[in-house]
Image: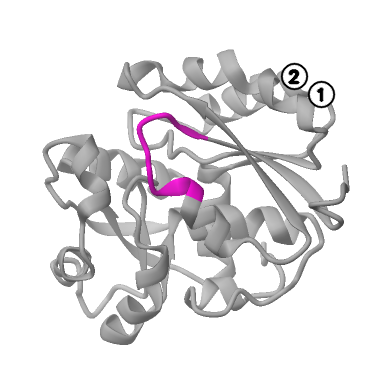
């Protein structure tokens, strides 16, 4: 609901307790007139993250949000479109008729908007996570011939990844037949690196936090270009 701090809308953003980068990144992306309200869930039990989100999502309704945004890539585990549809349905039941955005749906929409066909997927930790993402996006109709993890050992160290670290990860996936790079894993704080990454790679980089916030804005009817955050952020509309 519009308020004094968000005359164009209020977003309830759900992010992990363990991720220190997501709140400042969403603030970097926030256009004038939107009020970001942050709520948190735990990643303590990785296989139970969807349950952890469902336990806390109703707590974000007290700010009268215009959208509820779940900033977590649940597809970085064994995850199917049917599971995601069931999970999305449970979330929607919990929040009623408030529009819902998930990072997973946003990434799919972002890839379609960029015209992606052959995608290379990068995640911050082990290759297990990027493999799971590869499987999910292939079931969604994209070719994902390459994937890799940055091999960060401790979750708390992901935020320390530098531009050069991220670039090195993408370089390993830089094959001539790739048209789009996908970053999953919202703890990897590369929002302010994407433009430079795209210049180096010569192709679009769909980064999860940018994709999620971009998707939320566009679904809310806000078409402002988000300058400085790469090609996707400049797209005014979602392309199916």
Q: Is residue 187 left or right of residue 140?
A: left
Q: What is the secondary structure assignment of the residue under circle 1?
A: loop
Q: Are circles 2 and 1 on residues that touch, CB within 8 Å?
A: yes
Residue visible at 87% across and 47% down in the picture = 3
Residue at 16% x, 72% y is 171
In percent of width and height, residue 141 lies at 47, 53
Query: Which residue is identified by label 2?
Result: 93
| Nearer-the-camera pick, 104 or 161 | 161
In front of the other: 62 or 67 = 62
Where is residue 101 drawn, in percent x and y?
65, 42
**Rendered view: 238 above or below 62:** below
Is residue 231 depicted above or below 62 in this figure? Answer: below
Q: Position of residue 201 (x, y in %)?
A: 28, 81
Q: Residues within 10 Å of mark 2 (few under 14, many from 20)?
A: few
Q: CA distance from mark 2 to mark 1?
A: 5 Å
Whether residue 136 is visible, yes or no, is yes
Residue at left offset 63%, top offset 22%: 57
- Magenta highlight range: 15-23
Q: Which quadrant of the structure image shows residue 96?
A: top right
Number of labels in the image equals 2
Task: Please give the residue where the numbered disc 1 appears in the rendered image.
Answer: 96
- Out of 93 and 188, give the one closest to the viewer: 188
């Amino acid at each position: 609901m519009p308020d004094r701090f968000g005359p164009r809308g209020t977003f309830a953003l759900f992010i992990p307790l363990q991720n220190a980068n997501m709140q400042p990144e969403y603030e970097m992306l926030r256009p004038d007139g939107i009020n970001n309200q942050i709520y948190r869930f735990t990643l303590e039990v990785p296989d139970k993250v969807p349950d952890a989100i469902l336990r806390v999502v109703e707590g974000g309704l007290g700010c009268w949000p215009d959208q509820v945004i779940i900033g977590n890539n649940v597809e970085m585990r064994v995850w199917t479109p049917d599971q995601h549809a069931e999970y999305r349905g449970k979330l929607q039941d919990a929040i009623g008729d408030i529009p819902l955005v998930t990072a997973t749906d946003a990434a799919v929409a972002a890839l379609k908007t960029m015209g992606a066909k052959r995608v290379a997927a990068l995640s911050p930790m082990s290759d297990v996570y990027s493999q799971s993402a590869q499987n999910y996006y292939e079931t969604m109709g994209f070719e994902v011939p390459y994937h890799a993890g940055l091999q960060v050992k401790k979750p708390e160290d992901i935020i320390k990844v530098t531009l050069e670290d991220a670039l090195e990860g993408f370089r390993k996936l830089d094959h001539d037949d790739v048209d789009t790079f996908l970053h999953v894993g919202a703890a990897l704080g590369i929002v302010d690196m994407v433009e430079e990454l795209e210049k180096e790679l010569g192709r679009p980089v769909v980064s999860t936090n940018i994709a999620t916030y971009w998707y939320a804005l566009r679904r809310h009817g806000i078409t402002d270009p988000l300058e400085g955050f790469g090609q996707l952020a400049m797209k005014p509309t979602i392309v199916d």
